[in-house]
């Protein structure tokens, strides 16, 4: 686990801007294109004979990028407890993807579930053409570096009906670019729909699960807790035999293939927030009345009123663009069968933190939701491991949809939520998550707390129904609640 103290530190990505032409690397500095003497000495470039080139492409990295905090497991990696992140959109010509990540003593596991209307693979594949069909590229840099090096890895796997070594390739970074190499890794595909390589509109999607031994990356054991690698994922898409390939979808968005410093972060271990500060104050935050704008929240995707629709036009053209911001309840749901993605749902909620006095130290924070039901018939509902993530951006309760909602900045907490059985006494069954880490981060930045709840569940009938901020005033106790305790700064 990586830990933060009451001082609260955040990991930040390394911002790098370079232009690579052949084997010449020109550092772009605030002063222009002239390399510094130190840079020139390190890279064999003469500072006295500066080369000026027309600047056509500028690769610029965000200083703070999305990250995945991967949980560590003993023995087999449980699918439903892996960290979850996501990217992309749902439309007839765009793909959305869930990413699941976990690791154990021997290997790293990265799984992609992809919503895709047409599934196509290459009948005569070559390493050079794998990404011209439905395929996934997984990028890793084990040093967390900013530029390509032997610590940079590119794993490519194309869709097929069964595991297919001829539809895999692996590359290693170098000063001159990617070089194909040969190391052991597994890539297991899956798919759901009418058939591969046909023109039917009834396909639903596919999956690819990467298992990469740490030994293949030159490591004798997993990285210590708190280690950060660079990671990115690219989903390639093709919707007809004739092609051409459709535009790629990426996590994080706009990922440059050859600049690890612009990729996301893969952190080993979950965040733990600790402080020895004694609490001196507390606050409970929730929407005070039904018509108040405070604590906006919204369900996106397979909301309770939009559960598992089967109409093809609806799921590809309308499902991802509907807003349920004023619904009095919400669903959280996911599963391993990608065919059922119209059942999947995420929940977004924002808590203002301006009621906390300035200059305090966050001691603890607890999110409470009240559950009143489950998906599936009697006896069908299964337990869920519902995760909380910090959102990567702001959103509007009246306009948020599956397709325009911000992605997760990072996953920060997870709790098991069992099905409810028998009659329910309102306000419902309380379920809690420790969100101290996220509150401390948001408070330190002077921002509201923007949270997303989703799951990496595997079982059918895993949906869980909760009370939203928009419930009537008769059920104020059931509304989402954040309880924060703080102490004095030393």
Image (cartoon, helix red, strand yellow):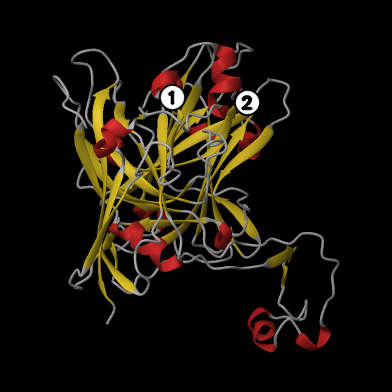
Q: x%, y% of residue 121?
A: 59, 25
The answer to whether residue 246 is above or below residue 377 is: below
**Labelled pair 2, 1 in contact (Cβ < 8 Å):** no
Near-viewer residue (379 or 347) = 347
Near-viewer residue (340 or 349) = 349
The image quadrant where one finds the N terminus is bottom left
Q: In which quarter of the image is residue 321?
A: top right
Q: In this view, does 99 lie to the left or right of 60?
A: left
Q: x%, y% of residue 137?
A: 54, 42
Q: What element carries label 1?
A: loop
First along the sequence among labels 2 and 1 = 2
Packing grade of label 1 (10 A; few <14, some 14-19, many >=20) is many
Q: What is the C-alpha distance between the residues marked 2 and 1?
A: 38 Å
Residue furthest left in the image? 422
The answer to whether residue 235 is above or below residue 276 is: above
Which residue is under mark 2? 124
Q: In this view, does 209 lie to the left or right of 78?
A: right
Q: Is mark 2 on a helix, strand or loop?
A: loop
Q: Is residue 364 left or right of residue 401?
A: left
Q: x%, y% of residue 94?
A: 62, 30
- Foreground label between 2 and 1: 1
Q: Image point 59% across, 48% down: which residue?
A: 253
The disc placed on residue 16 is none
Residue 117 visible: no
Residue 429 visible: yes
The answer to whether residue 2 is above or below residue 95 is: below
Q: x%, y% of residue 370?
A: 25, 35
Q: Image point 85% across, 75% down: which residue?
A: 52
The image quadrant where one finds the C terminus is bottom left
Near-viewer residue (397 or 72) = 397
The answer to whether residue 430 is above or below residue 11 is: above
Which residue is under mark 1? 302
């Amino acid at each position: 686990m990586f830990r933060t103290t009451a001082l609260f530190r955040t990991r930040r990505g390394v911002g790098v801007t370079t232009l690579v032409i052949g084997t010449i690397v020109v550092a772009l500095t605030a002063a222009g294109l002239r390399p510094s003497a130190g840079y020139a000495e390190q890279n064999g470039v003469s500072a006295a004979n500066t080369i000026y080139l027309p600047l056509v492409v500028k690769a610029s990295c965000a200083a703070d990028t999305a990250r995945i905090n991967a949980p560590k497991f003993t023995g087999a990696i449980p699918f439903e407890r892996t960290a979850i992140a996501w990217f992309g959109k749902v439309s007839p010509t765009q793909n959305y993807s869930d990413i699941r990540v976990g690791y154990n003593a021997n290997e790293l596991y990265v799984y992609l579930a992809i919503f895709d209307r047409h599934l196509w693979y290459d009948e005569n594949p070559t390493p050079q053409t794998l990404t011209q069909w439905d395929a996934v590229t997984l990028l890793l840099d084990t040093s967390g570096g900013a530029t390509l090096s032997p610590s940079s890895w590119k794993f490519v796997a194309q869709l097929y009906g069964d595991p297919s070594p001829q539809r895999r390739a692996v590359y290693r970074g170098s000063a001159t670019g990617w070089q194909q190499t040969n190391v052991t890794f597994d890539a297991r595909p899956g798919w759901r729909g009418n058939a591969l390589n046909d023109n039917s509109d009834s396909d639903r999607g596919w999956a690819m699960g990467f298992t990469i031994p740490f030994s293949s990356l030159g490591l004798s054991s997993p990285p210590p807790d708190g280690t950060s690698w660079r990671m990115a994922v690219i989903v390639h898409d093709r919707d007809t035999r004739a092609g051409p390939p459709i535009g790629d979808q990426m996590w994080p968005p706009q990922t440059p293939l050859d600049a690890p410093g612009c990729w996301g972060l893969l952190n080993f271990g979950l965040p733990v927030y600790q402080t020895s500060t004694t609490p001196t104050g507390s606050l409970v935050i929730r929407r005070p009345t039904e018509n108040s704008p405070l604590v906006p929240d919204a369900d996106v995707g397979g909301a309770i009123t939009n559960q598992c629709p089967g109409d093809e036009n609806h799921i590809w053209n309308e499902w991802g663009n509907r807003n349920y911001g004023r619904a009095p309840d919400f669903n959280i749901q996911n599963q391993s069968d990608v065919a059922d993605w119209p059942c999947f749902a995420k929940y977004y909620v924002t808590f203002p933190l301006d009621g906390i006095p300035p200059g305090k130290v966050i001691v603890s924070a607890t999110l409470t939701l009240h559950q009143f039901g489950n998906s599936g018939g009697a006896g069908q509902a299964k337990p869920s491991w519902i995760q909380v993530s910090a959102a990567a951006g702001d959103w509007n309760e009246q306009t948020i949809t599956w397709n325009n909602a911000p992605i997760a900045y990072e996953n920060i907490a997870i709790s098991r939520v069992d099905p409810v059985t028998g009659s329910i006494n309102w306000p419902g069954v309380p379920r809690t998550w420790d969100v101290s880490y996220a509150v401390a981060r948001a408070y330190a930045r002077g921002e509201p707390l923007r949270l997303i709840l989703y799951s990496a569940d595997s079982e059918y009938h895993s949906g869980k129904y909760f009370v939203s901020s928009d419930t009537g005033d008769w059920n104020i106790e059931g509304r989402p609640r954040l309880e924060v305790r703080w102490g004095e700064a030393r």
